[in-house]
Amino acid sequence: MTVEFDPKRELKIAPSILSADFARLGEEIRDVEEQGADWIHVDPMDGHFVPNLTIGPNVVAAIRPHVKTVMDVHLMISPADTYLEAFAKAGSDILTVHAEAGPHLDRSLQAIRSYGCKAGVALNITTPLSVIEYCLDKIDLILVMTINPGFGGQKFTHSVVDKVAAARKMIGDRPIWLEVDGGVSPETAPLCWNAGADVHVAGSAVFNGGTPEDYKRNMDAIRASCA
Ligand code: DX5
Ligand code: ZN
């Protein structure tokens, strides 16, 4: 499927399956989508760019048929370019690379679009927005990290809220989603939403409890906190 940008800004929740039951990923995706998830966020990690190892293109391809919404793939791998085609072929709708993952971000973004995916750029906490100033026309999504990537369940970094607001300003009326990832909960989601984020990634705050009823309650709580 292809996901198209809708200029009407609305709050989206993208549960990160890093906090799901890995033995039942298909079911977990179905449950969380039935309970109101807007996108499914997937976190490949290489044990080199971040101090954790998770999944590769084979697993992404295996879960693809279970995703009825949008598969939002956040690559925490370096170098990323070598694997972009494989993750695109695995069925990513949105493919996001870290700005810190290689010296030629512009080339990575062009490659992602050439494979038919929407192109995202993730910025670590200490990376300034200026690194994307000259390639905004090649970007479909900006992911502002609100933790140091690598693990779920970490504490939100409040100092990054100003960067979210600056990113919203930089986007202006361009067709670019603004996503936040890390420590997003009913306490911190309103800070991001009010600063201008639209896509809220949440792992532990959504999958906490482990049943579909919990997922619904957890996502409703995030939405209610931003209303
Ligand atoms: C971490 C990942 C996140 C992670 C978020 O590096 O990018 O997507 O799953 O987990 P929570 O919401 O628990 O902080
Ligand atoms: Zn992520």
Image: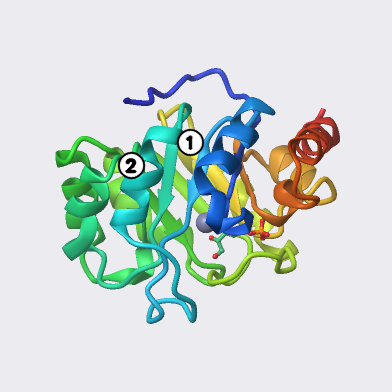
Specify which label sits upstream in the sequence, 2 or 1: 2
Q: Nearer the viewer, mark 2 or mark 1?
A: 2
Question: Circle 2: is it few (<14), some (14-19), or many (20+) Cα within 10 Å?
Answer: many
* Above or below for 157 versus 120: below
Q: Residue at x 37, y 74 (%)?
A: 46
Q: Position of residue 223 (x, y in %)?
A: 77, 32
Q: Quadrant of residue 136?
A: top left
Q: What amino acid is labelled 2 in the image?
A: Ser
Q: Residue furthest front?
A: 23
The C terminus lies in quadrant = top right
Q: How much space separates mark 2 and mark 1, taking CA atoms?
A: 16 Å
**What label does residue 177 carry, if any?**
1
Numbered disc 1: secondary structure: strand
Judge by depth and name the residue closer to the eye, 127 or 44.
44
Residue designated by label 2: 92
Q: Residue at x 65, y 61 (%)?
A: 160
